[in-house]
Image: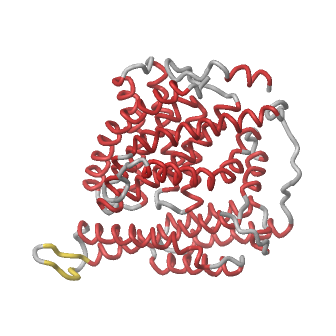
Amino acid sequence: MGGNATKCVGQGRSRGMGYWRFDTRSIVRGAFFGLVMALFVGVGDRADAALSGGAFPILGGISWAAIMGISTLLCRQPGGIIAGLVQGFVDIALGLSPLALIFPVVNAAGSLAYSLVAWKLPMDRLSHHFFAQTAGNVVGNGLVALGLFYMLQLPVEIILISVAVTTVAAIVGGTFLTRLVVDAAERSGLLD
Amino acid sequence: MSSTKRTCFQQLDPRTKLVWLCGWLLVCATTGQIGLLVGLIAAVFALSCLAGLELRRYLPLTRAWALLGFGVLLLHLMFTASGDVLFSIGPVAFYSEGARLGATVALRLYAILLGLSLFAMCTEPTELSLVMVKAGLGYRYAMLGGLVLVFFPLMEEELQDIFSAQASRGLELEGALRKALAFGPILVPFCLRSLRRSNEVALAMEMRAFGLSASRTFTREIRLQARDYGVMAGLASLLVAYFLVMPN
């Protein structure tokens, strides 16, 4: 325990991330960010339902991308995966989405892809966040597309249009929001 | 989420319920028969009554599904051009195969959602944590389910507080689009408060020597009993019968 407590101090920086972090703080942080993701994606999804009837989950996608990036940067792995799993299981338990069954896999894969890029980049420029978001969103939304195809059996053209629009919006929105929150978190001193 | 009453259904071992859920999802995912899907939905309602659950607890889920189910049905009606023409509006014709496929997918989603909800309502998070520990997952990870359940309503309240606080500062939050445009001013304080709360919880856990030893004991144990083996055998027979008898 003492080792864990010592380890987590001074490893809170989101820049130039290491890949793994197993201390209690990052695991608990991951669980909390899973709740943040579940609640905030819910806000986005409700806004999407009001704007487009849910056909283009743009705001939900942006919220997901932003919190997936934030949780991966602030919790590392497996904290990022834990955040994704928590969001998925909350959605399953509350029956919030018919695709909830695949969300744990989608979130975990998106977070892993994001952290693979973030691991290799110093993450101190907007372009770095953009590349990491691109990786996370392509993987995550690609899996959602598979879910839409197999679970809802929608025509491929519709899936491609919906997923492409969501992915582009989520990459752009997610990049700016992730940078905004991560910068604010570093300035706040809560990562020390 | 989980119901507090302990009827015979709730008293089953969580692993038995997990086997039921897996079988349920398998049947829902593989059947294309509307009659069977309707039967499965009725079975969930019957099981809920047996478990002493109020059916109105499914109302929010049913409302959410109705919107999406209608959308799915409409999309299949519009884009599946096979079978007989049911009706047409101007140049757009709607086919019987589209209606059948749309109804099947919509009902399948409803059956899956109901099954997941019933499982969540009849299984306590601590039971799931114990299952995960039995399956070999470290208790540091397995206990996260309970933690999430405790903090979910608090975090929900916190998000609402942030919305109210920002609205009182003059941020426009009426309507979906304005709410969406206010993502930044909402997300930053929400994430920072979550960070602070998680730091406090982690510190409190470490102060109590959480994670010190590789294994730990629990006040509650899960053990498969004769009725669990009986239910699992029954479920396995039903699954075998389904795959042997039912044409898909």
- Please indicate whether residue A131 sits to the left or right of residue B34 in the image: left
How are the residues colored?
A: secondary structure
Tell me if residue A93 can be seen.
Answer: yes
State the residue at coordinates (39%, 67%).
B68
Q: Residue at x 35, y 67 (%)?
A: B72
Q: Quadrant of the C terminus of chain A?
A: top right
Q: Nearer the viewer, residue A44 or B137?
A: A44
Residue B60, horizontal then vertical, whole percent: 51, 71
Front-most of A37 and B181?
B181
Q: Nearer the viewer, residue A78 or B161?
A: B161
Q: Position of residue B248 (x, y in %)?
A: 47, 70
> Who's the residue at 39% across and 38% down the image?
A137
Q: Work out which residue is located at the far front of the displayed protein and give it.
A: B169
Q: Position of residue B75 (x, y in %)?
A: 29, 67
Q: Is residue B56 left or right of residue B32?
A: right
* In this view, A18 is above or below A91: above
Please indicate, yes or no, whether residue A145 appears anywhere in the rendered image: no
